[in-house]
Image (cartoon, grey):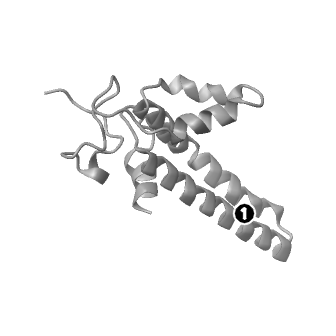
């Protein structure tokens, strides 16, 4: 849960830096669970009250997490040494989505790359430095 909150609260629209696989996939897991729960609750409320406007709860949540979801995916691609524009590979029919998943599950570059230092480095504070833009000393 701390990974989800880190993405939504601290790195809402941060497209700079790098994100570990754990940060991306934990965010994706909790986001999926929340979407399912909101859809179920909204559907139940609509069926009980016949007020279809309650389905907007789902839409509001989905719009609210769109930017952080995109940002963490871009930072995840940065960790593998790829530009955030590689996210658009998912638009290629049939193989694009598979290719993007392969990029997202690939282990990140060891050591620093052009997008920042390795978030798995032994001296990195695991949860505090993930996805944060790095300043050069």
Question: Helix, strand, or loop for circle 1?
Answer: helix
80 relative to 49 in the view: left or right: left
Q: Quadrant of the C terminus?
A: top left
Q: Quadrant of residue 33?
A: bottom right
**Residue at the image position 69 percent from the left and 29 percent from the top:** 96
58 lies above or below 99: below
Where residue 5 appears, x then y in whole percent?
43, 57
- Residue 12 is drawn in which quadrant? top left
- Which residue reaches farthest left? 137
State the count of labels: 1
Query: Which image quadrant for residue 56?
Result: bottom right
Going 77% across and 72% down the picture, which residue do you hit? 45
List the residue tagged with mark 1. Answer: 39
Above or below, comparing residue 50 to residue 64 in the picture:
below
Which of the pair 133/78 is nearer the observer? 78
Q: Position of residue 48 (x, y in %)?
A: 83, 77
Horizontal placement of 38 versus 72: left or right? right
Q: Which residue is drawn at 78% across and 60% down?
A: 53
Residue 72: x and y in percent read 47, 41
Label 1 environment density (alpha carbons within 10 Å; few <14, some 14–19, many ≥20): some
Q: Which residue is drawn at 30% across and 44% down?
A: 120
Q: Nearer the viewer, residue 88 or 68?
A: 88
Q: Can you say which quadrant of the picture contains the N terminus?
A: bottom left
Identify which residue, 72 or 56, lies in the foreground.
Answer: 72
């Amino acid at each position: 849960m701390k990974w989800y909150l880190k993405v939504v609260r601290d790195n809402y629209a941060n497209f700079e830096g790098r994100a570990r696989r754990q940060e991306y996939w934990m965010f994706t897991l909790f986001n999926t669970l929340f979407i399912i729960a909101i859809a179920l609750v909204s559907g139940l409320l609509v069926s009980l009250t016949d007020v279809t406007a309650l389905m907007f709860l789902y839409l509001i949540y989905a719009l609210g997490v769109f930017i952080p979801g995109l940002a963490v995916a871009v930072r995840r691609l940065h960790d593998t040494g790829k530009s955030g524009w590689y996210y658009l590979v998912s638009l290629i029919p049939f193989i694009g989505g598979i290719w993007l998943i392969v990029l997202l599950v690939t282990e990140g570059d060891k050591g620093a790359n052009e997008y920042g230092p390795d978030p798995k480095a032994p001296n990195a504070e695991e949860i505090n430095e993930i996805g944060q833009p790095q300043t050069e000393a």
